[in-house]
Image (spheres, rainbow, N blue to C red):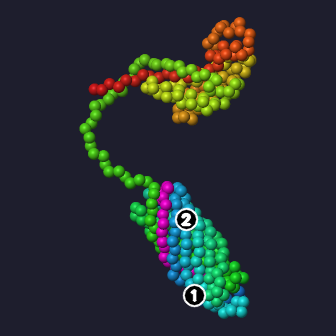
């Protein structure tokens, strides 16, 4: 069987040289036929027990899914064949035994060329069932499964060459033997899902009038004021859900101006209550929070900046100086607690020749 494996590795490499890498999101079903083989291991057989017929016709069916170009998962059932044993175990002369099982394995594709040629490595587990007619019972074992193979694609149909090997598929104490199992097979599978078919060429139509976009020399500058109460909780720089909606509206408003080379400044402002340092730090944090939301909603980071002005740019001036009541003073100073979105850009105009 070692010679068979060596030949298969060489054949797989040649076979894979024309094989296309698997498409992301495709599923497939397939059937395979080949030869199953049991390998004697004297150290794992009862005294005098050995295999008389090592190889038999084998077949299987499987389904799989390709999570990426290089990784997939596969579930299958295999009938490995009927084999004959010589020797005596537990007072009985051994005879025929049938082997079948279910496999669950991951497939890792290995590209061989820039055109997408590949082979695949397979690793997982085999749940084997061995039925011995002498003992008239079936015993099961979970064993590691390894394999190598390749697939040749013809659109939705794929031809598959594969070798799998599983270690110690039985316990010696069940029937007197614990062989390794292997299978060489050629399979045919149907692939579905993945990329949509290429559309037919679009018929030529009469050309539309040529439009020339002319940049005006005039620079447009606008200002959008966002109420801090709608954006943040008191003394907080964490943007609220309502604040995120306000950013969405501001982005929409900027786009309506139909400008090129847009640059945005987000300016944070506070009222005069609290220390100057605290107010300056809070205004900077709030401006940065708004900028981060702009970027999260698709605005390019290199077109927007955050600045904090603290209490230095009051809009109410001295209007609230004589108010002693704390609540009324807070209401009076509300316009100072704001975030301004200042954007500039070049106005553009379409001229049809």
Left or right: 48 in relation to 298: right
Q: Earlier in the sequence, mark 1 or mark 2?
A: 1
Q: In the image, which disc is placed on residue 53?
A: 1
Name the residue carrying label 2: 74
Image coordinates of residue 159 in percent, x first then y, are 44, 68
Q: Residue at left 66%, top 19%?
A: 270
Vertical arrangement, residue 353 with respect to residue 133, above or below: above
Magenta-drawn stretch contains 25: yes
Vertical arrangement, residue 242 with respect to residue 126, above or below: above
Q: Is residue 40 visible?
A: no
Res 115 → quadrant:
bottom left
Secondary structure mainly formed by the magenta segment: strand
Q: In the image, which disc is placed on residue 6?
A: none
Identify the secondary structure beneath mark 1: strand
Q: Nearer the viewer, residue 231 or 209?
A: 231
Left or right: 172 in relation to 290: right
Q: Nearer the viewer, residue 277 or 191?
A: 191
Image coordinates of residue 307 in percent, x first then y, are 62, 23
């Amino acid at each position: 069987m070692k010679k068979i494996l060596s030949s298969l590795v060489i054949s797989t490499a040649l076979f894979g040289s024309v094989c296309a890498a698997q498409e992301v999101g495709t599923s497939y079903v397939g059937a395979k036929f080949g030869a199953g083989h049991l390998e004697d291991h004297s150290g794992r057989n009862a005294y005098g027990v050995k295999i008389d017929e090592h190889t038999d016709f084998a077949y299987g069916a499987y389904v799989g899914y390709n999570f990426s170009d290089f990784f997939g998962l596969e579930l299958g059932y295999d009938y490995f064949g009927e084999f004959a044993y010589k020797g005596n175990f537990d007072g009985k002369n051994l005879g025929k035994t049938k082997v079948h099982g279910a496999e669950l394995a991951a497939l890792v594709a290995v590209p061989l060329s820039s055109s997408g040629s590949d082979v695949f490595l397979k690793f997982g587990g085999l749940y084997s069932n061995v039925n011995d007619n002498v003992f008239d019972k079936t015993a099961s074992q979970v064993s590691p499964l390894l394999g190598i193979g390749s697939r040749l694609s013809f659109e939705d149909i794929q031809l598959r060459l594969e070798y799998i090997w599983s270690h110690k598929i039985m316990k010696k104490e069940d029937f007197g033997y614990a062989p390794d199992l292997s299978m060489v097979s050629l399979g045919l599978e149907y692939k579905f899902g993945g990329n949509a078919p290429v559309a037919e060429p679009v018929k030529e139509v009469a050309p539309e009038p040529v439009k020339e976009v002319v940049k005006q020399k005039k620079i447009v500058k606008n200002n959008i004021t966002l109420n801090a109460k709608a954006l943040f909780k008191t003394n907080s720089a964490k943007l609220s859900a309502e604040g995120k909606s306000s950013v969405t509206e501001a982005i929409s408003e900027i786009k309506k101006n139909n400008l090129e080379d847009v640059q945005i400044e987000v300016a944070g402002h506070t009222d005069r209550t609290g220390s100057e340092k605290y107010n300056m730090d809070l205004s900077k944090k709030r401006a940065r929070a708004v900028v981060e939301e702009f970027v999260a909603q698709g605005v390019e980071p290199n077109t927007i900046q955050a600045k904090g002005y603290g209490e230095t740019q009051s809009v109410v001036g001295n209007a609230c100086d004589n108010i002693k009541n704390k609540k009324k003073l807070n209401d009076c100073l509300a316009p100072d607690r704001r975030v301004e979105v200042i954007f500039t850009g070049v106005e553009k105009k379409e001229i049809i020749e």
